[in-house]
Amino acid sequence: MRNSAITLVIFLVTTACGDKNQYIEPPPLKVTVAQPIRKDVTEYLEFTGTTKAVAFVEIRARVSGFLQSMHFEPGTQVEKDELLFIIDPKPYKAELMAAEAELAATKAEFNRAKTELARAEKLFRKNYLSATDRLKRQTERDTAAAAIGRSAAQLESARLNLSYTRVTAPMSGRVGRNRVDNGNLVGEGEATLLTTLTQYNPIHAYFHLNERDLLQVMAIRRKKAQTHEQGPNKQPDSKLDIPVFLRLVDEKTYLHEGELDFGASGVDSETGTIELRGVFPNPGKRPVLIPGLFAELRFPVGQHKDALLVGEQALSADQSGKFVLVVNTENVVEKRSVTPGQVIDGLQVIRSGIQANDRIVINGIQRARPGAKVDPNVIEMASLSTLQQKNKEILKTDKAQP
């Protein structure tokens, strides 16, 4: 029995020593890769800003009286010189009639004084009238002439006051609510505010440019100026001549095109920015752009031929800066430092660091490591742009929901 046990142990030991432990390498990590898109792109500087009316007017009573009638619908579009209010004109019509009568009287007095002076001149030449009496008649004539001027001025003032009883729109725009109801006394001791008028077409959008981008724009304009001076028509260009594009928060694309028409005289030392303004056409009785809206703006600063674009998710960052992971011809991951540009339709412009035939890792980046072998699945980079836009729309919708 003891010999049988020893024999069994020796058999098991011998069998165990005959088996060798072998290392089985894990399969390569699966990653998704895509080659960069190559196309011509326009480089933009992008900003956030707010819209502001090009003109805003307070309509006030210029004469005193009882407000007789209102001739507009609050919140609607009115045209220049359109009637808005009527202040009781009867007292001012009476003043006008009195001024007309006064002018007629002074003209009659002038004619009498002129006739008397002509008669005095004849008598003076025949020595029938003294020089003192002649001077008296001349003074009466001059006084009557001055009275005509004074009466004419009073008549013009009366006409103006009567015209002020008809309150009209000084410009085309959207009229606000009436601040005073019919029957109230206005303009007594103060220029009573009756309503407001806002001009929407065109409309301004204000935004700020930082110092670094400002220097870039100035360099571009200097280059344009040098090119213009070398052309056949050497004329100074005083216009900014920079198009500006605007979109509202609910718009997917930059639907509104205007131009840069104003820049502050200097950089604000506290913020390090300069204020700029774009002007945009805004036609129609119900314009899309109204004052006070938050807006996204951009204007072009350069053109890039054969630019390379990759999905935004392909870009990573560490202490050394921005980088992407590239799968080489041996399916080994490499780290490439890159210089990113702007984002266009969900794709990131890469200014330097990659080639057109590189396979960029766009999925599996968190698990892929430089030097590791991977199993790449190739897709088209263009498909990421549509996916990225859908994700942004879903995210925007989620944020808008309460």
Image: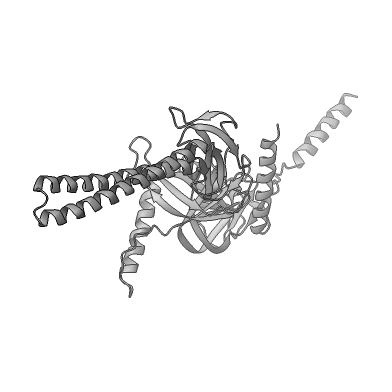
Query: Relative to residue 250, is residue 256 depicted above or below?
Result: below
In depth, the one of 359 and 57 nearer the eye is: 57
- The residue furthest right is 1
Picture quarter with the N terminus: top right
Please tell me which residue is depicted at 68% across the width and 58% down the height of the picture: 379
Please tell me which residue is depicted at 58% across the width and 57% down the height of the picture: 328
Please tell me which residue is depicted at 48% across the width and 62% down the height of the picture: 304
- The residue furthest top is 2
x, y percentage for residue 298?
A: 50, 51
x, y percentage for residue 313?
A: 60, 47
Query: Relative to residue 239, is residue 289 depicted above or below?
Result: above
Residue 210 appears in the rendering: no
x, y percentage for residue 141?
A: 22, 48
Q: How many discs appear?
A: 0
Q: In the image, is 104 to the left or to the right of 67?
A: left
Residue 111 appears in the rendering: yes
In depth, the one of 253 and 383 nearer the eye is: 253
